[in-house]
Image (tube, helix red, strand yellow):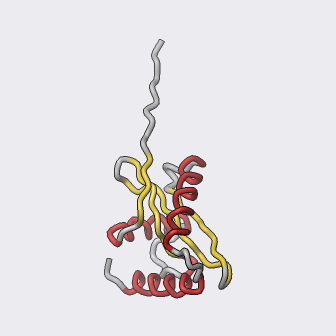
Amino acid sequence: METIIKQQQKISFRAVTISDMNTIVKLYQQQKATLDSALTNHFGLPFYVAEIDRKIVGYSYATPTNANNYHLNTHIDTNFSNNQIDESLIRESELFFKNEWQNSHYKNLSISIAHLVNWLNNSNS
């Protein structure tokens, strides 16, 4: 009788860097089922990634719900999508986001998203 051993993959989390943006845009486009349209403010502000074996398999991002609040979201690669990655990424992201945006100026979040989307749409990356 053959025994199948399922290897646990170690998930790590870290802050987004500029070099991650190409992968993040591709994951976003994969989720939206589009590969060539311009990004909109619905793209949000990515700030944390989940990695397995140094490969980005998901990211979290924030979108403002109004001037006084925000919503955390995730996009997970469909090949790796599961509740454990999603829940862990949200939990890690909440701590990071609250520390970075501790003054609760969520109107600045909208401005940051608009600048990022404009930069991504106009870059040659």
**Location of residue 16 by image quarter:** bottom left
The location of residue 114, given as percent across then percent down, is 50, 86
Residue displayed at 67% across by 81% down: 68
Query: Along the horizontal axis of the image, is 63 left or right of 11?
Result: right
Residue displayed at 42% across by 50% down: 12
Residue displayed at 57% across by 47% down: 84
The location of residue 99, given as percent across then percent down, is 51, 69
Relative height, residue 121 to residue 4 (above, below): below
**Location of residue 125 by image quarter:** bottom left
Residue displayed at 55% across by 69% down: 98
The location of residue 83, given as percent across then percent down, is 60, 48
Query: Along the horizontal axis of the image, is 99 left or right of 10?
Result: right
Query: Along the horizontal axis of the image, is 89 left or right of 49?
Result: right
Between 92 and 40, the one nearer to me in the picture? 92
Query: Along the horizontal axis of the image, is 73 left or right of 2?
Result: right
Q: Residue furthest front?
A: 103
| Number of marks | 0
Relative height, residue 47 to residue 105 (above, below): above
**Location of residue 94 by image quarter:** bottom right
The location of residue 90, given as percent across then percent down, is 57, 58
Relative height, residue 90 to residue 37 (above, below): above
Between 41 and 88, the one nearer to me in the picture? 88
